[in-house]
Image (spheres, grey):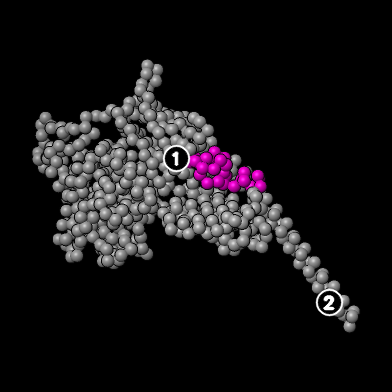
């Protein structure tokens, strides 16, 4: 009996020893995997691959795998925290809100699975900042209160090695990308012509900026320089970008001071400029206006006028609405509003092609589309495109959506402060921005509306709205006229011609959703918009032409 008991005890001890050995082995493997992932992260941060999303995801996958394989190890909470931070850092490069949501997912997993880990307080604070960025201050406040209650617990000190490889929030002195302090200038985009240029600086986060003009000298052309702070310059940007395209000659970038980036624009001429910040994703927009051709110009009268039937309507009226830019909203990776059957980007592209065809055949105008197929074009590029093309009118076409299924009707907007809360909602929808960003845009409008053709835009909006609604009402019942409204639409900011945005119906409304699937209905929408443009031309004695 004693011998049997001894065998059982020895067996239990052997099993316990094997269990401890396996746990120790798993812990060792987890530590090795974590160190290997950190080494991969360090190599990635110092390479040119940092510009490509697929490599970010490969590095993130290394830390995800550690948590999945070794959930009971000491490094599992660290792996979750690192995964979340990397997604947060990736947002600074991608501008995708989905990356922020992924970061939230892994922060939440950390505090749910490991509530006693010292990293929980940091995870709560980081998640609160993300909710603020997403425009959800109530959730941010709740997480901050929770994080504050954990402050009494002594945090585990972070090793120098981990701190060097961990991405840090804007404002810290070190991060995954070593150059990141306040905001990193990641990319420079530009569009330029003889008398207009738009330069966009893509940023990782918001920065302060100051713009100054240097007058021309014997040896140097006029220059505009913009100081951004606190900011650092991405090491992958060239210090000098030659343009040599009319107004803008060259863009020069340099780290003027440790936390100040100076962007210098060498110009052929300069009469005016405008600098403003846009959020989600963060970018700084610089509009340059040079010496332009006479702003008012009547259409030339032929020496031997052709028969009246051979003249376009614009020529018959003696007007110069010669070029119209039609902007089909959204496109590519941005579908706009949608349901199981339809996407806004597809509907507006069809309508835009119809409008272009009718404008050419009926009014004899030259028509240019900002996109003629399913591709993504940033909002600021659409505005620059219209200015460079020297368009006489700009019409952006969209489809509306609302949480209220009963909401329906047609409405037309021009740029100004939001006329009501519903206008703010629509602007947020079309700008793909938060309410916080819209309030910043409202402040921006105070400084730029003086240089915008508000009265012409308002008249164009009223005539397009009136003719579009009346054209539809002649064939269809229950067509609601929602009127002309104002809102801070990014796509209308900086246009140098009368510009409007037309919402042709609600995809969220069952009746209008059915009609938006009908080609005959889309044909009438296009006809109504063209009639509105024709009415605008008839009401204008001399059209603005650049």
Count of numbered circles on the image: 2
Residue 210 visible, this orientation: yes
Q: Nearer the viewer, residue 248 or 201?
A: 201
- Measured as percent of width and height from the top left, residue 150 is found at 57, 58
Q: Residues within 10 Å of mark 1 (few under 14, many from 20)?
A: many
Q: Residues within 10 Å of mark 2 (few under 14, many from 20)?
A: few
In the picture, which quadrant includes the N terminus? bottom right
Separation of marks 2 and 1 at Cα, in angstroms? 70 Å
> Element type at marker 1?
loop
Q: Mark 2 vs mark 1: which is more N-terminal? A: 2
Check the image and report above or below for 536 versus 104: above
Q: Nearer the viewer, residue 523 or 168?
A: 168
**Identity of the residue drawn at 37% across and 55% down:** 335
Q: Which residues are magenta?
A: 159-184
- Measured as percent of width and height from the top left, residue 506 is found at 28, 60
Residue 166 lies in the magenta stretch: yes
Check the image and report above or below for 263 versus 118: above
Residue 8 — which label? 2
Q: Quadrant of residue 71?
A: bottom right
Check the image and report above or below for 344 versus 448: below
**Identity of the residue drawn at 15% across and 57% down:** 470
- Measured as percent of width and height from the top left, residue 249 is found at 39, 27
Residue 207 — which label? 1
**Identity of the residue drawn at 15% across and 43% down:** 537
- Measured as percent of width and height from the top left, residue 141 is found at 46, 57
Image position of 290 (left or right of 232): left
Q: Nearer the viewer, residue 368 or 279?
A: 279
Image position of 483 (left or right of 3): left
Chief secondary structure of the magenta span?
loop
Residue 107 visible, this orientation: no
> Element type at marker 2?
helix
């Amino acid at each position: 009996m004693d011998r049997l008991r001894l065998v059982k005890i020895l067996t239990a001890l052997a099993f316990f020893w094997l269990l401890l050995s396996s746990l120790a082995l798993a812990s060792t493997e987890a530590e090795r995997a974590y160190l290997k992932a950190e080494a991969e992260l360090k190599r990635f941060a110092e390479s040119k691959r940092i510009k490509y999303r697929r490599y970010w995801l490969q590095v993130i996958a290394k830390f995800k795998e550690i948590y999945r394989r070794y959930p009971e190890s000491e490094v599992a909470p660290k792996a979750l925290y690192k995964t979340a931070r990397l997604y947060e850092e990736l947002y600074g490069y991608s501008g995708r809100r989905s990356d922020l949501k992924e970061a939230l997912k892994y922060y939440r997993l950390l505090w749910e699975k490991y509530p006693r880990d010292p990293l929980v307080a940091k995870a709560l604070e980081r998640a609160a900042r993300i909710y603020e960025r997403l425009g959800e201050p109530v959730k941010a406040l709740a997480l901050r209160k929770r994080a504050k209650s954990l402050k009494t617990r002594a945090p585990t000190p972070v090793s120098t090695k981990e701190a060097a490889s961990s991405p840090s929030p804007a404002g810290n002195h070190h991060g995954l990308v070593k150059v990141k302090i306040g905001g990193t200038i990641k990319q420079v985009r530009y569009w330029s012509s003889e008398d207009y240029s738009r330069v966009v600086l893509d940023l990782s986060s918001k920065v302060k900026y100051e713009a100054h003009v240097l007058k021309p000298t014997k040896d140097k052309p006029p220059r505009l320089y913009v100081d951004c702070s606190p900011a650092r310059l991405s090491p992958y940007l060239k210090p000098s970008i030659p343009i040599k395209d009319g107004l803008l000659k060259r863009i020069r970038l340099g780290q003027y001071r440790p936390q100040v980036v100076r962007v210098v624009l060498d110009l052929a001429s300069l009469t005016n400029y405008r600098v403003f910040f846009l959020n989600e994703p963060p970018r700084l927009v610089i509009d340059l206006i040079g010496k332009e051709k006479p702003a008012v110009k009547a259409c030339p009268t032929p020496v031997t006028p052709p028969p009246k039937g051979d003249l376009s309507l614009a020529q018959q009226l003696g007007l110069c609405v010669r070029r119209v830019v039609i902007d089909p909203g959204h496109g590519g990776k941005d579908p706009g509003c949608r349901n199981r059957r339809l996407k806004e980007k597809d509907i507006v592209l069809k309508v835009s092609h119809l409008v272009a065809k009718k404008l050419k055949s009926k009014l004899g105008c030259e028509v240019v589309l900002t996109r003629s197929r399913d591709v993504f074009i940033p909002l600021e590029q659409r505005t620059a495109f219209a200015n460079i093309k020297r368009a006489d009118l700009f019409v952006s076409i969209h489809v509306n959506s609302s949480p209220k299924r009963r909401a329906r009707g047609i409405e037309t907007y021009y740029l100004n402060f939001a006329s009501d809360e519903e206008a703010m909602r629509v602007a947020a929808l079309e700008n793909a921005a938060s309410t916080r960003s819209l309030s910043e845009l409202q402040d921006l409008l105070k400084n730029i509306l003086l240089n915008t053709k508000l009265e012409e835009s308002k008249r164009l909006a009223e005539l397009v709205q009136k003719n579009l609604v009346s054209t539809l009402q002649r064939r269809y019942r229950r067509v609601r006229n929602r009127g002309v409204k104002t809102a801070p639409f990014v796509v209308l900011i900086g246009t140098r011609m009368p510009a409007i945005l037309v919402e042709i119906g609600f995809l969220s409304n069952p009746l209008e959703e059915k009609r938006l699937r009908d080609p005959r209905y889309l044909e009438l929408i296009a006809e109504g918009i063209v009639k509105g443009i024709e009415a605008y031309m008839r009401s204008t004695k001399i059209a603005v032409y650049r």
